Image (tube, rainbow, N blue to C red):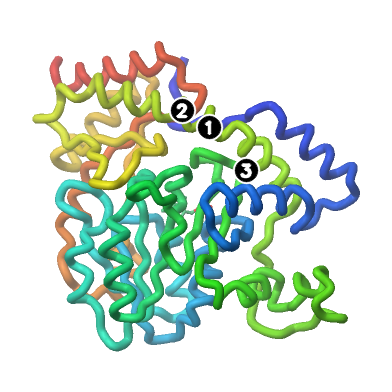
Amino acid sequence: MAIPFNKPYFSGNELSYMKQAIESGKISGDGTYTRLCQAFFEKRYNVPRVLLTSSCTDALEMAALLCRIEPGDEVIMPAYTFVSTANAFVLRGAIIRFVDCSPDHPNMDVSLLEKLITPKTKAIVCMHYGGMACDMAKLKTLCDSYKLYLIEDAAQAIESSFHGKPLGSFGHLATFSFHETKNIISGEGGMLVINDEKLMARAEILREKGTNRTAFFRGEVDKYTWVDLGSSYLPSELTAAYLWAQLECMDRIQQKRIRIWNRYMESLAVLKTDVMLPVVPDGATNNGHLFYLVCKNMEERDALIAALRKKDIHAVFHYMALHKSPYYMSRHDGRELPHCDYFSNGLVRLPVFYELEEDQQNKIMKEVLSFYRP
Ligand SMILES: *Cc1c(COP(=O)(O)O)cnc(C)c1O
C-alpha cells in the first residue's frame, strides 16, 4: 500500500457538528461554532482577540490592510516561506526585502534584519518554520525600537511556544492556517490573532466587507453601512463546525504527531553526518507539524525522493525561494541568499499525519537509511 505524504484527519464529530449548524438554520459566518472556536483560542493562548478567517492567506491580507501598507512601503520577511506571506503585502504595493535563513535552520536569520531597515520599512513578518519559533525576544526588541509592526505568520505554529509563551501572542498580529495539510484542519480555514488593541475595531470591519455589521449585531450602532475598505474574510459556520470537532481532540492529535516526529528523529539520528537534521532552536518547541532532512544538493534530494517513490512512499520538497521566483525575481534587490538556496535545493519532508501507522513509518525510515547506507 502506497504511503501518502498527507492524509487529512477526521476525528469523528465533524459531521454531527456540521449537521447541527445546518439544522440551526444559520450557516453563514460568525455563528455559534465560529464564536466557540474564537473563544477557545483567546482563552488557551491568552490573547485579546481572535477572528476566524477563510484561510491564513486571508488573515495575512487582513494584516497588510490593518498595518495600512501603501505602495512603496518596505516589508521585511524570509525568502524561504510560502508565497502567501509575501503576496498579501505585494497586493498592497509593498516592496519586499527578503531575509536569508539561518545557516542551521530554515527560520530567518534575525541577526540580518537590522541592516535592512530603512525609513520606508513598515513591518517585519516572521514565519515559524515547522512550528519552531523564531527568536521572538530579539524580534520584539528590534520592532519596538524602530516602531515597526511585527506580524507572525504562524500558519504552521499551532500549539507551539517561545520560552513558554504561545506563538501567535508576540506580534501585533498573527495568522494561523487550518488548511488540510496543517495539524488542525477545516479543509480551508485560518485565523487572525489581534494583540494590538488599537487594531481590533478595524479588523472586524475589514473582515465584514468594510461594514460595521459586527458592531450592529452587538447593538452598538442602529444600522450598518460601508465605513472602510474590506472584503469577505469570514468562514462559513460549516467550516467552523468542522474545526470545532478538531479542537476538541487537539491534545490527542498533537501527541500523536509529536510521537511520529520523535520516532523519525531517533531512527535517523545516525545520518547526522550525511544530512542536516532538524534542530529545535533555543526557547522553541516542536509541534510535530513537519519532519525534514536536508540533502547536500538538489541531485541528492531528487534521487532520495525518487528512491522513496519507487517504494510507494510520497516525500516532497519545498519552498521555491521567493527571491528567485518568476514573479519576484526581477523585483528583488539582487542580494544573494545562500542559506535559503541551500534549504530550497536540499530539504525533503517525510510523511507526517495522524493516521501514519508504526509499520508504515518503519518502512519509510528503513528506506531512507538504506538510501544512505545501501
Ligand atoms: C500553509 C501556509 C500558509 C497558507 O495557509 P492557507 O490557510 O492555505 O492560506 C501561509 N504561510 C505559511 C508559512 C504556510 O505554511
Which residue is label 1 attached to?
251
Amino acid type, callout 1: Asp
Quadrant of the snapshot with the C terminus: top left
Q: On screen, 100 above or below 157?
A: below
User: Residue 270 vs residue 132: left or right?
Assistant: left
Which residue is label 3 attached to?
186
Number of numbered markers: 3
Quarter occupied by residue 215: bottom right
Upstream in the sequence, badge 3 or badge 2? 3
Q: Are marks 2 and 1 in contact (CB under 8 Å)?
A: yes
Q: Secondary structure at mark 3?
A: loop
Residue farthest along the top direction in this orientation: 359
* Residue in the picture at 67% in, 36% down: 245
* Residue in the picture at 44% in, 50% down: 166
Q: Secondary structure at mark 1?
A: helix
- The crowding category of the residue bearing disc 1, from other C-alpha atoms within 10 Å (few below 14, some 14 to 19, many at least 20), is few
Which residue is label 2 attached to?
255
Amino acid type, callout 3: Ser
Task: Give coordinates of residue 149: x percent, y percent.
Answer: 40, 74
Mark 1 CB within 8 Å of ligand 1: no
- The crowding category of the residue bearing disc 3, from other C-alpha atoms within 10 Å (few below 14, some 14 to 19, many at least 20), is many
